[in-house]
Amino acid sequence: MNEGPHLAKLAALLADPSRARMLGLLMPGQALTATELADACGIARPTASGHLGALVDAGLLSPAAQGRHRYFRLAGPEVAEALEQLIGIAERLGQHALQPGPRDAALREARVCYDHVAGRAGVGLLGRLLGVDALRPARDGALAPGPALAAVLAPLGLAPERLAPSRPPLCRACLDWSERRDHLAGRLGSALLEHALAQGWAARPAGSRVLQFTAEGRQRWDAIGAGL
């Protein structure tokens, strides 16, 4: 009897370049239609529908109907984080998804990992928050609020107790595939990304995971947790 997780089935799903491309396009957390995904992948729409059905059946994507359109998004942050780790493994094995160049450098500097900031910008943020005791390591990759967290968030108009209680947890570590160190995930990571976008510190180009900070915005981002 074949028991345990269906790892081979999952690997077969991810082995198809079009399905892998679709998942990558959805990594920033947005929802796209089958037509948009088909066009971005350069495949026929019936083919895209078949791929999307397989990914939904596997629990990797969640569909949602709105008006005349049916949208697809990643099933949750845990899917995005698993894909992030697989990208890191592929990089270490030399299976580069992108050609070397400025775009790669931009991804390493700052990118969106579902709903939080990854790359050097995300790793640096977590390092600062740990350094000033705003966060503390817990078990199994979790992070616990530290005594300085409220002081760090107050200038931003955020408070830990006001962050909506839901999945994922308030704060946890997510291993960064390009930096090989942890960046900040969880509701706190999501709230800080939303704050940076709302304040105009950074922008997300359409169809890309790159997070483009302005010069002033990067200074403000790097000031979070600094100087306490």
Image (cartoon, rainbow, N blue to C red):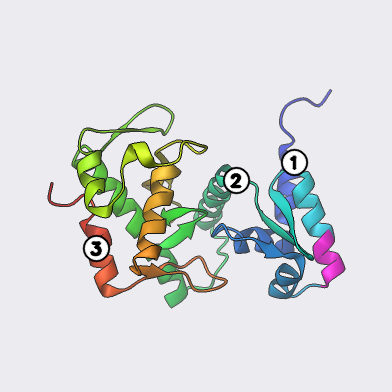
Q: Residue at x 51, y 37 (%)?
A: 166
Q: Is residue 148 magenta?
A: no
Task: Name the secondary structure under disc 3.
Answer: helix
Nearest to N terminus: mark 2 or mark 1: 1
- In the image, the segment drawn in magenta is 44-49
Q: Is residue 46 magenta?
A: yes
100 with respect to 35 (left or right) = left
Q: Residue at x 22, y 52 (%)?
A: 155
* Figure quadrant of the N terminus: top right
Q: Which residue is mark 2?
A: 76
Q: Are marks 2 and 1 in contact (CB under 8 Å)?
A: no
80 with respect to 164 (left or right) = right
**Among all residues in the image, which is located at the extreme left?**
227
Under mark 3, the amino acid is: Arg
Task: Name the secondary structure under disc 1.
Answer: helix
Specify the quadrant of the image occupied by residue 107. Answer: bottom left
The image's mark for residue 8 is 1
Task: Name the secondary structure under disc 2.
Answer: loop
Q: Up-down: is 60 above or below 171?
A: below
